[in-house]
Image (cartoon, rainbow, N blue to C red):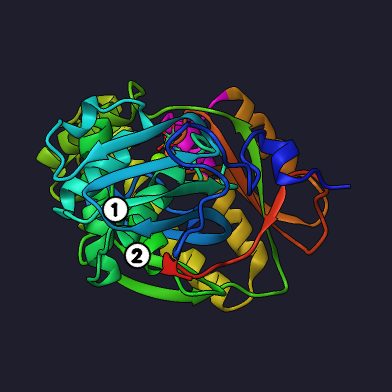
Amino acid sequence: MRPSVAERFGGTANGATGYGATVTENDTWTHVVHAPGRVNLIGDHTDYTGGLVFPMAIDRGTTIRYTPGTDRVVLTSDADPDPIDFTLPVEAEPGTVTPVWGRYVAAMAAELSSSTGIHGTVSSDIPAGAGLSSSAALECAVGLALGSDGTPTDLALAAQRAEHAATGVPTGIMDQLCIAAATAGHATMIDCHTLDITQVPVPGEVDVVVEFIAHRTLVGSAYADRVAECARAESVIGPLRAATLDDISRARHHLDDIAWRRARHVVTENERVRAFASALDGGDYDRAGRLMDASHASLRSDFETSTPDMDAAVERLSTTAGVFGARMTGGGFGGCVVALCQPGALDSGWVVHAARGAHHR
Ligand code: ADP
Ligand code: MG
């Protein structure tokens, strides 16, 4: 039998509130917001050069039950024993707030210049720090709870700025825009330069399966190095989002090997996203799967964001009967792998379904 999310990921099952003295289980909340996590099907480390990504919001997410009012933000979370409690407007640097999860909340409040606070509880069944974007789900849910009333793109941009302020890591727009803008039953193909979104139906005749490999943090990881290496490549090649393989070949002797390989990943990955969208649309799952395999190989060899455990999982999954393809997903250096397969082909991991974006319930 497939393990439950709580068994598989530990400590993040729904409904377990009750930490801290300021918010109790007996409180009755007047409002509920929910933001999904996301799994990236293909297109990793392309967003911060304005390239293409293909994430899917999933039927696991973060829910905040709360009551608005007063000038304080008082929240507990089932993912952290320490509650947060601060006064609006936010005066502290968000990156210095404790406990650490309060940084995302304070940064979002600062971004929105919120003056009306919330009291409530956060519950989530997304494993935190596993590449399924619990951070962007938290930011987007907090944004709605604090009264953000712009477009999904406005919410996503505020959440991305909040993530930068909270963590200091220069992450791209993929997570927040997918989580803010997704529609049920669809993956969210995003042009990260124009922020144009194409909602692509995810066929019911395939399973998307996520397998957790290891917790990781992007703070202090090589993520920021990758951003800098891509910038170095762009200083020679020009915008990678518009570059071709010919441009990459021509740059071979004008760039150091690392920046050149990073650029080759980005340019080939953008092509794979386009090809994947049309393969999925045309029902060519073998081709879609081969593109996922190729994406993993590129992330492993050219972009160096995989790990031996992720490589082993991808190898095992992609050679299992009924699996079309598999790859690491998200920022890397740990996290999860994702597979596309025939329904029921895998009894490990977690079948996820395409869910709608952040919303009031
Ligand atoms: P990912 O977004 O892939 O899950 P990150 O490292 O970007 O990983 O974000 C994880 C961090 O986000 C956690 O360490 C925690 O600080 C915060 N976080 C996310 N979800 C929650 C939650 N439900 N409750 C408290 N903190 C959360
Ligand atoms: Mg994150």
Q: Position of residue 150 (x, y in %)?
A: 22, 71
Q: Residue at 42% of width from left, 37% of height from top?
A: 22
**Which quarter of the rendered image does ligand 2 occupy?**
top left
Q: Is there any visible trace of residue 171 in the rendered image?
A: no
Contact between marks 1 and 2 (CB within 8 A): the answer is yes
Q: Identify the residue position indicated by label 1 in the image.
A: 173
Considering depth in this image, is 220 or 201 the residue closer to the camera?
A: 220
Estimate the x, y position of residue 274 in percent, counting from the top left: 42, 66
- For marks 1 and 2 on the same chain, the one whose residue lies earlier in the sequence: 1
| Element at label 1 | loop
Q: Where is residue 167 in the image (x, y as percent from the top left)?
A: 28, 32
Q: What residue type is labelled 1?
A: Ile
Decide which of 262, 44 is in the foreground and name it.
Answer: 44
Question: In the drawing, what numbered circle is on residue 44?
Answer: none
- Residue 303 lies in magenta, yes or no? yes
In whole angstroms, how far apart are the C-alphas of marks 1 and 2?
9 Å
Kindly tell me whether residue 299 is visible in this rendering.
Answer: yes
Name the residue tied to disc 2: 190
Question: Residue 115, how many percent across, how many down?
Answer: 16, 54
Identify which residue is drawn at 21% across, 54% down: 158
Q: Give the range drawn in magenta.
A: 296-307
User: Which amino acid, mark 2?
Assistant: Ile
Residue at the spot 80% in from the left edge and 57% down from the top edge: 322
Q: Is mark 2 on a helix, strand or loop?
A: strand
